[in-house]
Image (cartoon, rainbow, N blue to C red):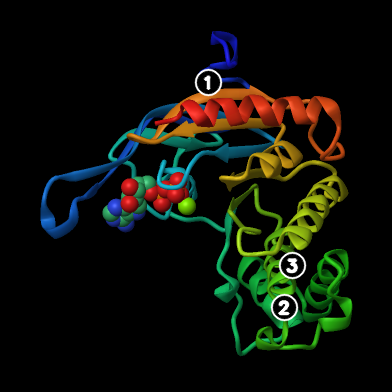
Amino acid sequence: MPNEQMIAVAAGTSDALVEVDRVSIQFPGSRGRGTVVAVEDVSVSIRRGEKFVLLGPSGCGKSTLLTAIGGFIPVSSGEIRVDGKAVTRPSMNRVLVFQDFGQLLPWRTVVNNVEWAIAKRWPKMGAKERAERACHYIERVGLGVQAQQYPNTLSGGQKQRCAIARAFAIQPEILLMDEPFGALDAINREKMQHELNRLWDAEDKRVTIAFVTHDVNEAVHLGHRVMVMSRGPGRLRALVDNPNVGSPPHDASALKLVDELRELLKDTP
Ligand SMILES: Nc1ncnc2c1ncn2[C@@H]1O[C@H](COP(=O)(O)OP(=O)(O)O)[C@@H](O)[C@H]1O
Ligand SMILES: [Mg+2]
């Protein structure tokens, strides 16, 4: 069972890249009646260079909090800061990758999807450097053979690989991932988790990743720290350190943490 030590509110940590400071987020209720509280009074910090997982049941406010960190929706109260500056709008420094297979530009090939993002990020970069950079990341996600194909000819997994290559290629300060493997079958899902860990290693462990999932195994495979959120309404329930990150999914200590997180989620309203 979780204990008090597992529950930590770490706003203001010195190596914090993202500070979520007493944040609440509400939406207008349906037909204009009342409000829906999606996130309530959450304070947490995401450290520079870590893989941080937001875990919780459906509807507990994970996506809402992640999109607010991206600057895509405003907070109702409190403040989100990145590098000490309040987030008020989206930025190329914060890239969002989500579950939907439709996030690529359908009229561009795999390589052109990546090049397009690079051109947006660095408009003055020469064509040769841009192409080299795009190819580098496409190779890295194992899509070299498909580089000239259009998205509609790719499998779901390949589309997600392309979206991830595109995100890494523009070197964001923080990569926001909202259940990016949620629509993949179990085998591809595990494969992609493994590859995401590998990609992060290959980038010298510099990219900060905030990763949303409702899958406990995925959380333990990917996150240096796991933030458990609870419904009714979206609160921080626990913040758990994970020394097992990247270890084989059947490792005994990873399995123990999986059980602990399951217990926590069971108690979650
Ligand atoms: N744009 C919106 N308008 C109204 N309610 C919303 C909106 N987005 C999310 N919500 C509500 O906020 C709560 C949290 O949603 P969400 O962040 O999507 O949860 P999760 O990603 O954990 O499944 C839910 O009750 C959801 O219905
Ligand atoms: Mg969601």
What residue sits right under mark 1 in the picture?
12
Can residue 46 be spotted in the picture? Answer: no
- C-alpha span from label 1 to label 2: 42 Å
Q: Is residue 120 left or right of residue 80?
A: right
Within 10 Å of disc 3 (Cα), the crowding (few <14, some 14-19, many 20+) is many
Looking at the rendered structure, the kind of residue marked 1 is: Gly
Within 10 Å of disc 1 (Cα), the crowding (few <14, some 14-19, many 20+) is some
What is the number of the mark on residue 147? none
Q: Is residue 132 left or right of residue 36?
A: right
What residue is drawn where x is 19% and y is 45%? 35
Callout 1 touching callout 2 (CB < 8 Å) = no
Is ligand 2 closer than 8 angstroms to the Cβ of mark 3? no
Q: Quick one: label 3 or label 2, which is nearer the N terminus?
A: 2
Looking at the image, is mark 1 or mark 2 nearer the viewer? 2
Residue 216 spot, x, y in % from top left? 64, 39
Is ligand 2 closer than 8 angstroms to the Cβ of mark 2? no
Looking at the rendered structure, the kind of residue marked 3 is: Arg
Q: How many marks?
A: 3
Looking at the rendered structure, the kind of residue marked 2 is: Ser
Q: Quick one: 233 or 91, which is closer to the camera?
A: 233
Callout 1 touching callout 3 (CB < 8 Å) = no
Q: Secondary structure at mark 3?
A: helix
What residue sits right under mark 2 in the picture?
155
Corner quadrant of residue 124? bottom right
